[in-house]
């Protein structure tokens, strides 16, 4: 195999640059990230000048292995080596976003934006960063800009979905409903928007509408556990214990170690006077 002979080459010449890169690349493409990191880092110590793409690949491999702090170190090294690649800024920004360091996330997303990148990473995560910092007006402006500029995106439904989320956050349920419905019209297979529609109607006391949208969610994704729970809860609330039990049991098959679901099944049987 390629790996066998690359490793043989390194036995003869441990600093063979091309072989180190190729070994790292093979493991990187095969998602064997620990090995990719090992060979890429060996390569980085041999190179006489910093390689931005190499640093970015090391960062990505750390990211995939659930080590965001190490990933961030190498994303920032990539930026330092080449300040003209928007993907490097986007990668660092997403780490900061997930760490809830929204000011930092905004800084790096906006740096990426100044390099003329577009798409979900630029608009949606940047908008959400502003929203989490309570600048809803700026967040909405960015999402609306994304809709206008990112016209060819396969993820356009996400712009509508996040506008719905923003309006729901602002306690404007009617506007949220409008955007969530645009999201599912744009992509009928997107379950999150259906579930959130059900949730809004549920809060408004419109149980029939809530049930309808939760069921639409399960049509889009039959394993969407939150919709199962919500349906079971509604049916329990309106004393339809057989229907409640149906969805709790469906949920239990997916999360058998969840004690609260088992308890709710027992409670549904109790309310139905089925003690045995």
Image: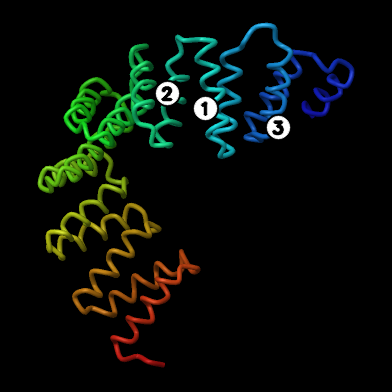
SS label for mark 2: helix
In the picture of the structure, the residue carrying the numbered disc 1 is 72
Q: How many marks?
A: 3
Residue picked out by circle 3 = 35
Residue at x-position 40% and y-position 58%: 223
Q: Position of residue 80 (x, y in %)?
A: 52, 12
- State the CA–CA distance, disc 1 to disc 2: 11 Å
Mark 1 falls on what kind of element?
A: helix
| Numbered disc in front, either 3 or 1 | 1
Q: Mark 1: give few (<14), some (14-19) or many (20+) Cα within 10 Å.
A: many
Residue marked by disc 2: 90
* Rendered location of residue 205, percent (x, y): 12, 63
**Residue shown at 16%/65% (left/top)?**
207
User: At which x and y percent is residue 251?
Assistant: 40, 67
Q: CA distance from mark 3 to mark 1?
A: 19 Å
Quadrant of residue 252 in the image? bottom left
Q: Any mark on residue 221, and which?
A: none
Up the image or down, 188 lies above or below 126; here it is below
Residue 10 picture quarter: top right
Where's residue 155, x and y in %? 32, 33
87 above or below 257?
above
């Amino acid at each position: 195999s390629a790996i066998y002979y690359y490793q043989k080459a390194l036995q003869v010449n441990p600093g063979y640059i091309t072989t180190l890169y190729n070994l790292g690349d093979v493991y990187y493409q095969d998602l064997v990230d620990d090995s990719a990191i090992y060979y890429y880092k060996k390569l980085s110590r041999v190179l006489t000048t910093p390689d931005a793409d190499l640093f970015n690949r090391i960062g990505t491999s750390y990211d995939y292995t659930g080590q965001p702090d190490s990933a961030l170190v190498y994303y920032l090294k990539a930026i330092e080596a080449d300040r003209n690649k928007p993907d490097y800024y986007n990668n660092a920004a997403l780490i900061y976003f997930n760490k809830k360091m929204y000011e930092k996330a905004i800084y790096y997303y906006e740096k990426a934006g100044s390099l003329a990148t577009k798409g979900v990473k630029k608009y949606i995560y940047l908008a959400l960063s502003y929203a989490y910092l309570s600048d809803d007006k700026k967040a909405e402006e960015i999402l609306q800009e994304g809709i206008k500029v990112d016209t060819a995106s396969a993820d356009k439904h996400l712009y509508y979905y996040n506008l719905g989320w923003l309006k729901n956050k602002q306690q404007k349920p009617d506007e949220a409903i409008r955007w969530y419905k645009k999201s599912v019209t744009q992509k009928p297979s997107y379950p999150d928007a259906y579930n959130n529609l059900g949730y809004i109607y549920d809060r408004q006391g419109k149980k029939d509408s809530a049930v309808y949208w939760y069921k639409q969610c399960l049509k889009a994704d039959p394993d969407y556990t939150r919709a199962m729970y919500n349906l079971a809860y509604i049916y329990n609330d309106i004393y339809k214990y057989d229907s409640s039990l149906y969805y709790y049991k469906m949920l239990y098959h997916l999360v058998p170690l969840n004690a609260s679901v088992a308890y709710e099944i027992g409670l549904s049987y109790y309310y139905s006077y089925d003690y045995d």
